[in-house]
Image (tube, grey):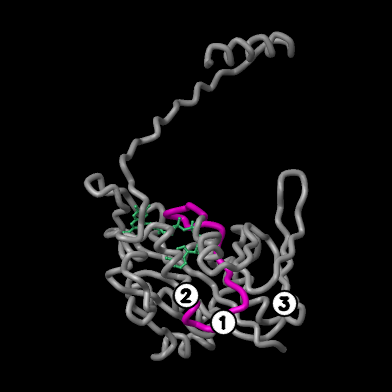
Amino acid sequence: MSNLHTVVCVKIVPKPEEVSVAPETLRLDRAGARSEINPPDMNAMELALSLKERHGGRVSIISMGPPFFTPLLRVALAMGADHVYLLSDRAFGGADTLATTYTLAKGIEKLGAVDLIICGEESSDGATGQVPPGLAEWLEWAQLTMVNSLDVDVEQRQARGRREIPGGHEILEVPLPAVVSVQTASNEPRFMDYKIKPWAFAEGRVTVWNQADLAAEAEYIGTPGSPTIVSGLDEAASRERKRIILEGSVSEQVEQLVAVMEQAG
Ligand SMILES: Cc1cc2nc3c(=O)[nH]c(=O)nc-3n(C[C@H](O)[C@H](O)[C@H](O)COP(=O)(O)OP(=O)(O)OC[C@H]3O[C@@H](n4cnc5c(N)ncnc54)[C@H](O)[C@@H]3O)c2cc1C
């Protein structure tokens, strides 16, 4: 068994059906929404835990967000992770993906020896998919995005992933340490283990680090570190379905279809 240290990035997100956008600030209004682990991050956790079963080592969870995330992150411990690190400071608020990835990278650097970072493919709220490549850039590590399966050769310090592409699949190899993102629904996340739930919910399983703990530079975090500006918000016009039923022979239907398409421009 190896000392493989895998870090899973877990974002806590509002349940999509309960969130709205505040028209004054153009930011997500999460006040009335319940939170959950970003669903793709459950796939990331499952992959990390299955690697731990195969190769040994440990799995750490890292998350950036407010203190109320803590109880939800304990679910990851009850699934089999070893420790949670929550990066939490008012100064981290308002972060875009650049500032988020800088902050997460500072947390991962503080963890010391890390072999592999596994992320979900995207969050259900921001949904940029920029965090995994952004982390790889800050850390100057290899990246392997959108895999649906992965194994590592700990001795050779290599990760080998499989990615579905239109018409086939790719097998990709990268050297460790590496950042990997996992396709949603690529595996079946395990349930919490109720036998270890009391351990997971005990004191001392979650470490909270603030800006000073990370020695994070003020100009790179939160709003000052976020060049992205939401300049406006438009509602996408919804199109009524026309429900046109084509009739007649095949060639007549083709003629009608071409006419409809020409009309629609
Ligand atoms: C101008 C601007 C202002 C913003 N202000 C705020 C704000 O005030 N408050 C706020 O909450 N959000 C804010 N956001 C959203 C914020 O940028 C994103 O939540 C964050 O950068 C992650 O991007 P994403 O959600 O697109 O992640 P993606 O890149 O889609 O996520 C991919 C994967 O990265 C990992 N990941 C992503 N975020 C985290 C995280 N926080 N911790 C651990 N792992 C993570 C997960 O594994 C996830 O599956 C703002 C965005 C913009 C553009």
Disc 1 marks a residue whose amino acid type is: Gly
Image quadrant of ligand 1 equals: bottom left
Q: In the rendered view, would you say 56 is above or below 66? A: below
| In the image, the residue with mark 1 has its CB under 8 Å from the nearest atom of ligand 1 | no
Q: Secondary structure at mark 1?
A: loop
**Residue at image point 46% right, 55% down:** 124
Mark 1 vs 2: CB contact within 8 A: no
- The image quadrant that residue 97 belongs to is bottom left
Magenta-tinted stretch: 109-129
Q: Residue furthest left?
A: 24
- Give the spatial CA distance, label 1 vs label 2: 14 Å
Q: Position of residue 223 (x, y in %)?
A: 30, 59
* Residues at marks 1 and 3, CA–CA distance in whole angstroms: 24 Å
Q: Which amino acid, by three-letter code, is at mark 3?
A: Arg
* Front-most of residues 224 and 80: 224
Report x, y in % for residue 209.
37, 80
Circle 3 is placed at which residue position?
A: 157
Pointer 3: residues within 10 angstroms few (<14), some, or many (20+)?
Answer: some
Residue 146: in magenta span: no
Whether the residue carrying mark 2 lies under 8 Å from ligand 1 is answered with yes
| Residue toward you, 13 or 60 | 60
Q: CA distance from mark 3 to mark 2?
A: 22 Å
Mark 2 — residue? 62
